């Protein structure tokens, strides 16, 4: 066999031996409110991830279109996969973003955001 015929087989074999790095990190699997949704002012905001998180390094904030943060105290569920917070006062109508920061149990840090609108 020539080298050119072996190259694709070697590339496939090498790829199969590499660890799946993307699967090793936690990912957001659901949120309340749902991304892009228009809702009445939520009483509870929650984010659920695919893996346990390191609570000391995981949190979120809710920010309106003017950049004003809503005061929240986040808690972590017993299974270590859900961050949640009770909203003390009704949110005014308008656009909001949940900005989250997470450290998974393996130490990888991730960030993301979930936009929603209060009607």
Image: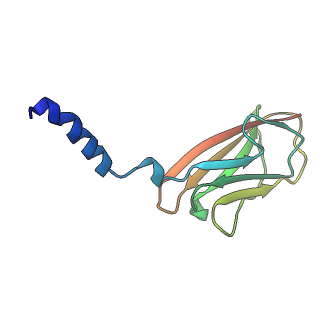
Q: Residue at x 69, y 57 (%)?
A: 83
- Closer to the camera, 26 or 7? 7
Q: Nearer the viewer, residue 25 or 109?
A: 25
- Please report the residue visible at 30 percent of the width from the left and 44 percent of the height from the top: 15
Q: Is residue 98 left or right of residue 42?
A: left
Image quadrant containing the N terminus:
top left
Q: Residue at x 52, y 63 (%)?
A: 105
Spot occupied by residue 59 in the image (x, y as percentages of width and height): 65, 54
User: Which image quadrant for residue 67?
Assistant: top right
Q: Position of residue 100 (x, y in %)?
A: 64, 47
Is 60 situated above or below 51?
above
77 is higher (above) or lower (below) than 86 = below
**Furthest-top residue in this view:** 4
Its colouring scheme is: rainbow
Quarter of the figure with the C terminus: top right
Q: Residue furthest front?
A: 1
Report the front residue among 103 and 33: 33
Number of labels in the image equals 0
Q: Residue furthest bottom?
A: 78
Q: Residue 88 appears at what percent x and percent y? A: 87, 54
Left or right? Give the position of 115 relative to 90.
left
- Which residue: 68% across, 70% down? 78
Taking the image as shown, residue 11 lies to the left or right of residue 2, namely right
């Amino acid at each position: 066999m020539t080298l050119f015929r072996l190259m694709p087989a070697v590339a496939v074999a090498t790829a199969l031996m590499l660890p799946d790095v993307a699967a090793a990190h936690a990912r957001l699997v659901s949120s309340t409110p749902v991304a892009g949704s228009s809702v009445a002012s939520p009483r509870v905001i929650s984010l659920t991830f695919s893996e346990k998180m390191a609570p000391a390094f995981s949190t979120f904030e809710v920010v309106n279109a003017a950049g004003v943060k809503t005061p929240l105290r986040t808690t972590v569920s017993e299974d270590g996969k859900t961050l949640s917070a009770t909203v003390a006062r009704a949110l005014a109508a308008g656009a909001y973003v949940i900005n989250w920061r997470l450290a998974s149990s393996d130490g990888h840090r991730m960030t993301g955001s979930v936009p929603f609108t209060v009607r």
